[in-house]
Image (spheres, rainbow, N blue to C red):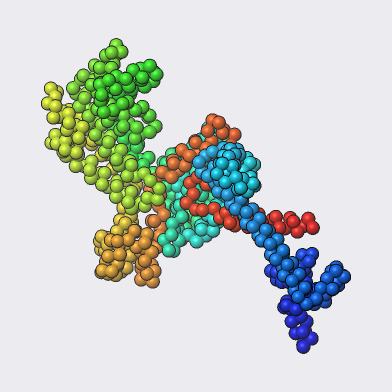
Amino acid sequence: MSRKRKVDSECRVFNEQWTYDYFFTQYKERGVCLICHDTVSVFKQFNIQRHYNTHHKDKYSSLTGQLRKDEIARLKTALTAQQNVFVKRKQENISSLRASFQISRLIARNGKPFVEGEFVKECILTASKEMCPEKTELFSTLSLSGSTVTRRIEEMGGNLHELLQNSSEKLRYFSLALDESTDIRDSAQLLIFIRGTNEKFEFTEELAALQSIKGTTTGEDIFAKVQQTIHDLKLDWAKLASITTDGAPSMVGRTRGVVARINQEMDRHNQPHPIAIHCLIHQQVLCCKRSLKLDAVMKTVVSCVNFIRAHALNHRQFQEFLSELNVEHEDLPYHTEVRWLSRGRVLKRFYELLPQVYDFMLMKDREVPELQDDEWKWLLAFLTDITELLNSFNIQLQGKGKLIGEMFAHVKAFQGKLDLIVRHVKEKNFFHLPTTQNRSLGNPTVPFPKEACVDLLESLQKEFQTRFKELHIHEKDIHLFRNPFCVDIDTADPIHQMELIELQTCDALKDAFKTSSLADFYASLPSETYPNIRNHALRFATVFGSTYVCEQTFSRMKHLKSPTRSRLTDEHLHHLLRLAVTNMEPDIDHLISQKQAHSSHSSHSSH
């Protein structure tokens, strides 16, 4: 026993006397020879003494006393200087790696080609030669070749997927938003976004997957990709709260649509069906397209705009004409059928430039009698106002991270505004219709076409009531989530009644609700006292009210996979989109440490 302790003390602790006797020092748990820099991993006097006697005794045994101490001090200084060089070089290598990752990330986020890294490096080297020539050699170590940038983007994309997997495991509930489109090469691409909350009401809203679909894009095909994504992220079907789609038949078909197939999967797991939401923005646009017909107005407007804008000479002459007249606007915008908001901008500008458009068309021997027709002008003014109102509503529904309660409130508010305007138009009250009001002040010879306009508004009303009927099914649950203090306890679900009584009589929580965000308020609710209300909020906080995030990401995709980059692979497109839209930070330090570990392992193996 005593022998073991003696060996332990001899082997594990460096003896300072060995520095003087054998020219050894301690560095990072190893003994280092000050003369030749060899190391011994075990602090054992026999090993250290044998090294000194074998390699250095003949040369250094004559040094004694102060001479020996001076030589030891000199050798120690030299070793420290060498170690500092190694440390500095290592730090420079790490900085170079980190810069390579960060620049590659910027290239990805801004949709630049991978080979752009070489141009960026050229710019950096040129700047360094002018501003800090002593640093040029350091900047030259920066690796930004096309293959390196590609590899960095792949590594960061993979890392973000791992981070999403880790955060997904902690989610209490999650929802999905799905949309399918085609890229520049007509390949079908399915975007799947996930929004989830953990027990602390911390949100995760990320691109779950970009799935390429070869061949057909039926509900079965899309469901298979959804299933694969759920599996890849290790998500639990039981936690699926809702699914939001664009309402296409492949998504909402009664038996073979994605939603139907997901419901069948939930039945298989004995779980309740998730809430199915048809994108509110998409529904609003469909309401407008089906009820705001007034083709006579739009046909004339589009014809005039196209005549002016489609021919370069006409367009230049029209701009010069406006400039000579010194009017407020310098041009007419194009009308794009697929972009609903463009209709509002075109109508507003067209109405404001109506006299100038009429004069210009006459100059070009293109008389358009409608532009002088008083009833047509009434309809143009009215359509301009209603489209503006609808555009404002559309913009309210747009944006990332919007909660279903807020979006539903906008829908209800718009329906209320529509009811008010119908009543006002019947009375020829144009207070909320400024363009129509402006027209009425001009004392037109033809009276306001009340019947046609009321019919149009009532058609719009009916369309909204029909389209948003599904959303009203969940009105009570959404209302509870949005403001539990305004819920009628008698009509509330029995599972929430006792907790609502407790909540609505607590003044401190009422004050907290007024001053906090919805997520912060629910996070502060004690789970012991309000388990069911909290659980309800966790579920509804995840619901996507629209597929806006998908639409925005498809716009990014069109920019990334453009005609000049049509050969971009699906895998690289996925990594680029993930880096472009993520709210997470890739763990670059972890990626660098992996590279160092790999490099160290390779170096060790080569020995």
Q: Furthest-front residue in view? A: 66
Q: Residue at x 42, y 44 (%)?
A: 547
Q: Residue at x 53, y 36 (%)?
A: 561
Number of callouts: 0
Q: Closer to the camera, 586 or 5?
A: 5
* Left or right of residue 243, residue 448 in this image: left
* Left or right of residue 264, residue 487 in this image: left
Q: Closer to the camera, 100 or 279?
A: 100
* Left or right of residue 148, residue 107 in this image: left
Does the image show residue 393? Answer: yes
Residue 515 point in image, percent of width and height: 29, 61
Q: Residue at x 32, y 51 (%)?
A: 406
Is residue 46 positioned above or below 523 on the image?
A: below
Residue 375 point in image, percent of width and height: 19, 23
Is residue 469 positioned above or below 30 on the image?
A: above
Q: Closer to the camera, 41 or 377?
A: 41
